[in-house]
Amino acid sequence: MKRFISTIVLATVLVLGCSKEDASAEDNNQNSAPNKNLNRQATGSSANDLLSDSTFKSMVIELVYVEGFEPSQTAVDNFISFLTNRTFKPNGITVEKRSIPSPGKDSFTIEEIADIEREARTKYNTDTEIAVWALFIDGKSANDSENSVTLGSAYWNTSFVIYQETVQNLSNSPLEPNRSVLETTVINHELGHILGLTDLGSDMQEDHEDAEHPKHCNVEECLMYWSAETGAGIANMAGMNSAPQLDAFCLADLKANGGK
């Protein structure tokens, strides 16, 4: 049986300047341009804003996929359930889903992924709504090798990418997991990173970071365990009907940072 090893890549991309245009006080039809820099910060730095309702009362998910690489509706539903169960957003969480043409590349660096976002993203934070960008790309990570593949990367404070072609290649075949289960696992794992896990913006209430695999939980059954997406993890998921859950340590961290 083929063995695949995947790694979670956390990348903080250089923040680029973006001018903010002030609307004329006399022109009620013209709104201020969004400050895009607010959505281009370090991974985990907006954990409290995502988890709590102290500033943002609602959340919008801009879910963008390359044509032919749409995630399953089950995985999207599980993603929203995960957010609903962990965050306080009294005015609701909405998903705006759309497709984009293929960039026409076989692999992508994280900077190239960020460039796609800069070009295609339309939703940014407002005064009371926080925006999340989720990209499902055709192609693999440029970090992949014969022994290692990347399924997803959280790279800004409200941004993550799923290498959907790789996910599809590792699912729905004998001895491989159900696709929606694998999709849910990878999506929720990356979401966990932008929610500040592990010790990435949501402080640990008790020490549970894996010393050999920083920013991951040391509890094997936890969603945030480093090997949740390794070859062994994928093989073990073959008979699973649902994705791994957060353990008590990770749940305590989220609650302490304003979440449920």
Image (cartoon, rainbow, N blue to C red):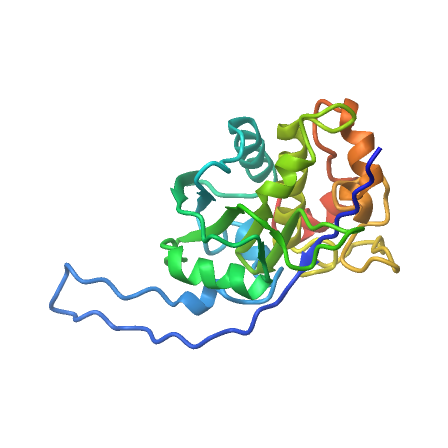
Whether residue 195 appears in this view of the structure is: no
Whether residue 164 appears in this view of the structure is: yes
Residue at the image position 57 percent from the left and 43 percent from the top: 87
Residue placed most toward the observer, 126 or 118: 118
Q: Could you tell me how many numbered marks the image carries?
A: 0
Image location of residue 54, percent across then percent down: 50, 54
Q: Quadrant of residue 67?
A: top left
Q: Quadrant of residue 121?
A: bottom left
Q: Residue furthest left?
A: 26
Residue placed most toward the observer, 37 or 105: 105
Query: Left of 65 or right of it: where is 235?
Result: right
In the depicted structure, whether residue 137 falls above or below residue 94: below
Residue placed most toward the observer, 249 or 136: 136
Query: Is the N terminus in the top left, top right, bottom left or bottom right quadrant?
Result: top right
Residue at the image position 78 percent from the left and 54 percent from the top: 205
Residue at the image position 39 percent from the left and 60 percent from the top: 119
Query: Is the C terminus in the top left, top right, bottom left or bottom right quadrant?
Result: top right
In the depicted structure, whether residue 133 falls above or below residue 10: above
Query: Left of 139 or right of it: where is 132?
Result: left
Image location of residue 114, percent across then percent down: 51, 62
In the depicted structure, whether residue 38 falls above or below residue 101: below
Residue placed most toward the observer, 258 or 247: 247
Image location of residue 124, percent across then percent down: 40, 57
Image location of residue 47, percent across then percent down: 60, 56
